[in-house]
Amino acid sequence: MADIFQEVDEELRADRARRMLLRYGGWLAAAALLVVIATGAWQYRHWRQQKSTEKLAAVYFDGIRALSAQPPDHKKALAAFADVAARASGGYRALAELQEAALTADDGNLAGAVAIWDRLAGDARLDPLLTQLAALLAVQRQIDSADPAQLAARLQPLLAADNPYRPLAEELSALLALRQGKTDQAKATLRALSQEATAPPGLRQRASAFLVELGG
């Protein structure tokens, strides 16, 4: 009888930790936004040298400002990013589409957002930083709904030792393991992440907190 109660308790703790990961999953969107803005800033300097593209650059940053407003104006931002995505090419088109996809998902159209991310992730002409970010965002937004095997396959390349998104991918791997009931695997991943010197401090602290929720 004690074994049954212990098993139930472990399942409840795993479920709480999984819900915590989903609840605080905005960290990935925030981190991704920082990468996008940093990349966009570099692209913007390049675009400033090309007079013919200055108007599109201005529209893009109008979208960024709309997102940064209090309260954020998602409708205005989405219109700006969609405009740039339709008229730009290369990196700026990809940046605009990444933003457009995130807002599309926030509006409840996950399928539409995933279609954008998948298209970007498969575009060999783009910087790998952008294609991998698109893949990571697609996994993050589908972590509790899509086929686990497909999600794991998409995460695998991002778990390479030299991949800049590896710590983020590891946290998603832990969440995926929890979804599948693989609590011990999730604990092992989170334990390693909490001790990983190259991971951002906030990510290490969060991994430690999740471990506590799972009972170590």
Image: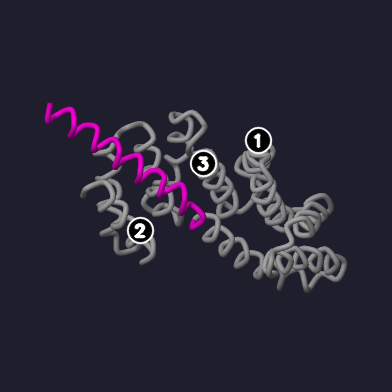
Question: Residue shown at 35%/37% (left/top)?
Answer: 177
Q: Which is more N-terminal, label 2 or label 1?
A: 1
Which color scheme is applied?
Answer: one colour
**Amino acid type shown at disc 2:** Arg
Q: Residues within 10 Å of mark 3 (few under 14, many from 20)?
A: many
Q: Which residue in the structure is indicated by mark 3?
A: 139
Q: Which residue in the structure is indicated by mark 2?
A: 206
**Amino acid type shown at disc 1:** Ala
For residue 6, which numbered disc appears in the image? Answer: none
| CB contact under 8 Å: marks 3 and 2 | no
Q: For the N terminus, which image quadrant?
A: top left
Residues shaded magenta: 1-27
Which SS does the magenta portion mostly show? helix
The image shows residue 92 at horizontal and vertical percentages of 72, 58
Q: Nearer the viewer, residue 28 or 44?
A: 28
**Amino acid type shown at disc 3:** Val
Q: Which is more N-terminal, label 2 or label 3?
A: 3
Question: Residue shown at 74%/54% (left/top)?
Answer: 93
SS state under label 2: helix
Q: Nearer the viewer, mark 1 or mark 3?
A: 1
Res 111 → quadrant: top right
Q: Is residue 26 found inside the magenta-colored segment of the image?
A: yes
As measured in the structure, the alpha-carbon distance from the residue carrying label 1 to the one carrying label 3 is 12 Å
The image shows residue 64 at horizontal and vertical percentages of 71, 65
As measured in the structure, the alpha-carbon distance from the residue carrying label 1 to the one carrying label 2 is 29 Å
